[in-house]
Image: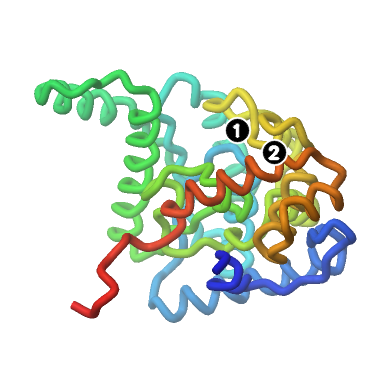
Amino acid sequence: MSDSAKHPRFLELPRNDRGLATETPAVRRMQQLLPVFLEQKLQRAGADGFVVALDGSVGSAVAAVMGIRATSTDDVLGLVLPAQLSDESSARTAETVAEMLEIDSHRLQLQPLLSAFQRVIGTTGEPTDDLVAMGNVGQRLRMTVLYYVANTTNRLVLGSINRTQRLLGSMTKHGENGVDIAPLSDIYQTEVDALADGLEVPSTILERRRCPSDHVSESDADRLDITPETLDSLLHHLIDRGDTEAAIADELGIDRDVVKRVNTWCAETRHKRHPPLKPSFDL
């Protein structure tokens, strides 16, 4: 059974001929529904607001704006959490976003924590220079900091992972997806971009949407040599509609190997978006 069949999408929206909710009626519907969703969940939790990791991306800016619309600028706290020197550009952009949105923010440098972690791990004889593993550590440290602040201020951790990232596994397990509430996780990247166009997202952020991040030299779409819109449409046909690889390739005019590669990515990273494995019997 597909992910879509097991977990129906929260937002049923009008879609264009590529299956994406990027037209004005869909964007307006998201603008209406998402703040209501956040407000309801906040009240149900008895929390006083949201804390969000601001990383200079469109997604984190959109998440912050949705949080503001659900509450107020006083109830949304932004944390800027650079861990490496390469994070500096994104960190400055994130601070600019916080200023323009008029929310409180704090920059917390995680490099000392990473260095301490490496020293401790080094005493076990395990390698401390694995770039992938240390990148994952950085994301999990961000999650830990977010939850510490949330715990001490009675807030919910507001995530910014979108559906494209979640389906492709473009995130760290128990890292970026380690949140209390994920308002964008059923919205594809191009749909988040369309939503950002209709919100108070700073223009400097909108200009960065197609640029690789400080950590990644190329996007998933770049690696596949297709446009972001084509990638999202591919995922919609594959996951939401359950179309065959051959049918998707014909519909979108792309090589079948590309569809197969995306299908493999989704399957291999399924563990990142599902609860831990457990016995089938009730313990």
Looking at this view, name the residue that lies furthest to the right. Answer: 17
- Of helix, strand and loop, which one carries label 1? helix
First in sequence, mark 1 or 2: give its number.
1
Front residue of 85/132: it is 132
Quadrant including the C terminus: bottom left
Residue displayed at 59% across by 37% down: 56
- Of helix, strand and loop, which one carries label 2? helix
Residue displayed at 69% across by 53% down: 235
Instruction: Look at label 1 and name its amino acid.
Output: Thr
Where's residue 172, x and y in %? 43, 43
Image vertical order of residue 235 relative to residue 204, above or below: below
Query: In the displayed structure, does residue 38 sit left or right of residue 254?
Result: left
Residue corresponding to mark 2: 205
Looking at this view, name the residue that lies furthest to the front. Answer: 246
Instruction: Say whether marks 1 and 2 touch (CB < 8 Å).
Output: yes
Residue 200 seen in this snapshot:
no
Front residue of 207/245: it is 245
**Total label count?**
2
Where's residue 159, x and y in %? 50, 55
Residue corresponding to mark 1: 93
**Distance in Å between CA atoms under marks 1 and 2:** 8 Å
Where's residue 79, x and y in %? 45, 44
Classify 10 Å Cα crowding around label 2: few (below 14), some (14-19), many (20 and above): many
Residue 245 seen in this snapshot:
yes
Query: In the displayed structure, does residue 4 sit left or right of residue 116?
Result: right
Classify 10 Å Cα crowding around label 1: few (below 14), some (14-19), many (20 and above): many
Instruction: Look at label 2 and name its amino acid.
Output: Ile
Query: In the displayed structure, does residue 218 sit left or right of residue 230?
Result: left
Q: Quadrant of residue 113?
A: top left
Residue displayed at 37% across by 36% down: 136
